[in-house]
Image (cartoon, rainbow, N blue to C red):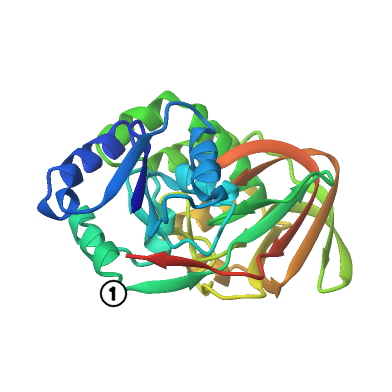
Amino acid sequence: MYLFIVNQVAGNGRGKRIFNKIRKSTRYQQLESTYVFTDYEGHAEEIAREATKNNLVNLKAIVVIGGDGTLHEVMNRMEDISIPLAFIPGGSGNDFARGMNLPNNPLEILKHIIEADIQQSYWLGNFSLEDAESKRFVNSIGFGFDAEIANIANQSWYKKVLNLFRLGSFSYAIALIHVLFQFRPFKVEIEMNNRKRVIEQCWMITIANHMYYGGGMKIIPNAKIQPTTFPVLLIHRISKWKILGMFITVFTGKHVNFKEVELLEASKVSILTEENIHYQVDGQTNRCSRCTVSKESTSIQIIG
């Protein structure tokens, strides 16, 4: 049995259009499967938890159709991560699909899912805010400047318009200009690999499972899907005009050549700030002053 979890409103209706195309295909019609549409934020978490709690229907795989946010919900509430997971991107950013080198054609992905001829281990990240219960992240977690950009973009009217033309990633470029002139660098105490340091004028901290975020930006171009450790990007003591120039090069990954950019690697990262700052996790935003990030020790299998 294959369970399809479908976010119809992802990518301004792209998720719905993709599933309708799949549902008409011969491969899907011959498949033993069922599907559930998500109706509200957090619904995918509930579906995944109930479906995997005891695996009563002997699931061969869970197939997520939607955006990275839908995948984030499903991965956070899977009770049994030994059940294979598949993803057919239908959102606006689709960075997980880029990081996994998924085909662009949904029917081609479906073919690979059914034939199970492509399978890859994937190690999620864990994060705990203000000593709360640990949660998982799929793509990345970031603090500071990039999180404020994501926050503005998520609330903007132009992101919805750009999504209609499959240009959602440009909403981040527009939001960058909004944030640039009002952002204040923050002081942070950061601990990595059992070493503490204080950064006085920090712009952003990003921890990632693969290279992409923000709809195709190569934020950490050397990032690899791997167990135990992940790359950490720090940007500090940089002028506003220089960071604007830096973000122009982020789609090519050349921003890492700026002297204000540090690339490190760690298995666990703890940050502490004097005031609440914005953070983003898989594109969803909020505020915090303390967070611990670690690597999931057990992998999940991604098929398709």
Q: Is residue 252 visible?
A: no
What residue is at 49 percent from the left and 39 percent from the top?
47
**Above-or-below relation of 215 to 257:** above
| x, y percent for residue 177 | 51, 38
Which quadrant of the view contains residue 159? Answer: top left
| x, y percent for residue 19 | 24, 41
Q: Is residue 190 visible?
A: yes
Nearest the eye: 301 or 253: 301
**Above-or-below relation of 1 to 7:** below
| x, y percent for residue 62 | 40, 53
Is 112 on the left or on the right of 197, as rendered? Answer: left
Check the image and name the residue furthest to the top.
157
What residue is at 10 percent from the left and 52 percent from the top?
26
Which quadrant of the view contains residue 112? Answer: bottom left
Circle 1 is placed at which residue position? 117
Is 100 on the left or on the right of 48, as rendered? Answer: left
Q: Residues within 10 Å of mark 1 (few under 14, many from 20)?
A: few
Q: Secondary structure at mark 1?
A: loop
**Above-or-below relation of 272 to 60:** above
Nearest the eye: 9 or 204: 9
Query: Where is the C terminus found, in terms of image quarters?
Result: bottom left
**Above-or-below relation of 141 to 148:** below
